[in-house]
Image: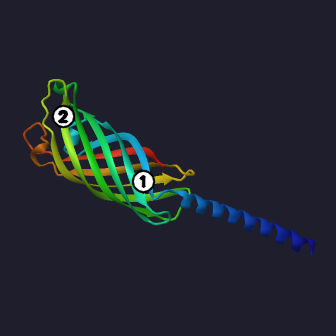
Amino acid sequence: MKRVLTTAAVLGITLLGSANVSAQETSEMANKSPVQFGVLGGVSFPISTASNLLKTGWNAGAFLNFGIANWPFGIRVDGQWNQFNFKSTQLNGVHFRDIHGTADAVFNVGSGKAVKFYLLGGVGVYNLNATGNNVSSNSVTKFGLNGGAGFKFNVGSLSPFVEARYHYVFSGDGFSDGNGNNAKFQMIPVSVGISF
């Protein structure tokens, strides 16, 4: 009888503890706003023909994330700055910069509480320009597509994350490879950030 009572007590404490943890997780999710603000920054890799002209650069940005707790879908609106140096020594002091705004659908995969994997993709408007000493502005604005994936870590009301995204800009004749040929501007920014 003593063994049965001990087992029942241990089982009861375990159930109460797990119910308390579950209630706490539910409460934290319920307390999260349907609109989250975030900031990010990292390294940007030019790819394809852009990698022949540009060195690895950096990125920084901010975003708004719209979504309801425990729903797998959301919408994210980003503004980001990417900057690169040219490989050519003739262009020392000249930078190539991209300022863009994107609107993306976000799909959270799985039901992990501490770590969530997500996919995102959408459309954007990209302003491309070379800036620096003795450079006349030749800014062009083009449409583009992007897609990527990341991991989000839930730490109370904060959500640190790491992600990588592929951007393809329909640059047309707005981006030349230096030989007079049209180069498609493509890049992969890898960023870390936090949303709250």
Residue 97's tag is none
Give the left or right position of residue 19, taking residue 111 as reference.
right
Q: Position of residue 191 (x, y in %)?
A: 39, 44
The residue that mark 1 highlights is 150
Give the left or right position of residue 20, taking residue 114 as reference.
right
Number of other residues with Cα within 10 Å of mark 1, as a class: few under 14, some 14 to 19, many 20 or more: some
Q: Residue furthest left?
A: 180
Number of other residues with Cα within 10 Å of mark 2, as a class: few under 14, some 14 to 19, many 20 or more: many
Q: Which residue is painted at 57% across and 51% down in the image?
A: 156
The N terminus sits in image quarter: bottom right
- Residue 93 drawn above or below residue 193: above
The residue that mark 2 highlights is 130
Q: Position of residue 54 (x, y in %)?
A: 23, 36
| Image quadrant in which you'd find residue 21 | bottom right
Q: Position of residue 72 (x, y in %)?
A: 44, 66
Q: Amino acid at mark 2?
A: Ala
The mark total stands at 2
Give the left or right position of residue 48, taking residue 21 as reference.
left
| Image quadrant in which you'd find residue 96 | top left
| Image quadrant in which you'd find residue 29 | bottom right
Q: Amino acid at mark 1?
A: Gly
